[in-house]
Amino acid sequence: MDKVFKALADGTRRELLDFLFANNGQSLGELCKQMTMTRQAVTKHLQLLEEANLVTVVWQGREKLHYLNPIPIGEIYQRWIGKFESHRIEALNTLKQALEEDSNHE
């Protein structure tokens, strides 16, 4: 999970993930057209995203297509965000019930 957090810490890598989210299955050339950096720099960022398992690749002939892998982000959500969100939902439900009880007494 450390590799995922390290990969997500960089704005350029998050931007690449956003591009893949918008249009999954892009080649290096397609991604480079959207970036303001060299092909080698984009390649290094994609390599880190692959190592973190945030991007998977599929070879189609001689072309390497990059796909967003949402599973590691989902795991972060479940482990770090979801447990905090359940408390908020519970608090909202309690507030809703209290307001409904108050309106029924009027």
Image (cartoon, rainbow, N blue to C red):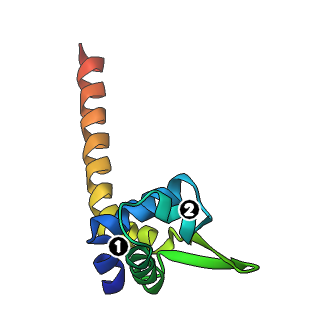
- What's the residue at 47%, 65% (across, down)? 32
91 over 43 or under it: above or below? above
Residue matched to label 1: 79
Amino acid type, label 1: Arg
Q: Which of marks 1 and 2 is in front?
A: 2
Q: In which quarter of the image is the C terminus?
A: top left
- What's the residue at 30%, 77% (across, down)? 5
Q: In which quarter of the image is the N terminus?
A: bottom left
Task: Name the spot of residue 40 as percent of width and height, x first.
Answer: 42, 79
Residue matched to label 2: 30
Label 1 and label 2: CA atoms lie apart by: 34 Å
Task: Name the spot of residue 20 as percent of width and height, x first.
Answer: 52, 61
C-beta proximity under 8 Å, tags 1 and 2:
no
Amino acid type, label 2: Glu
Q: Is mark 1 on a helix, strand or loop?
A: helix
Q: What element carries label 2?
A: helix
Question: In terms of depth relative to the viewer, which is nearer, 54 or 93?
Answer: 54
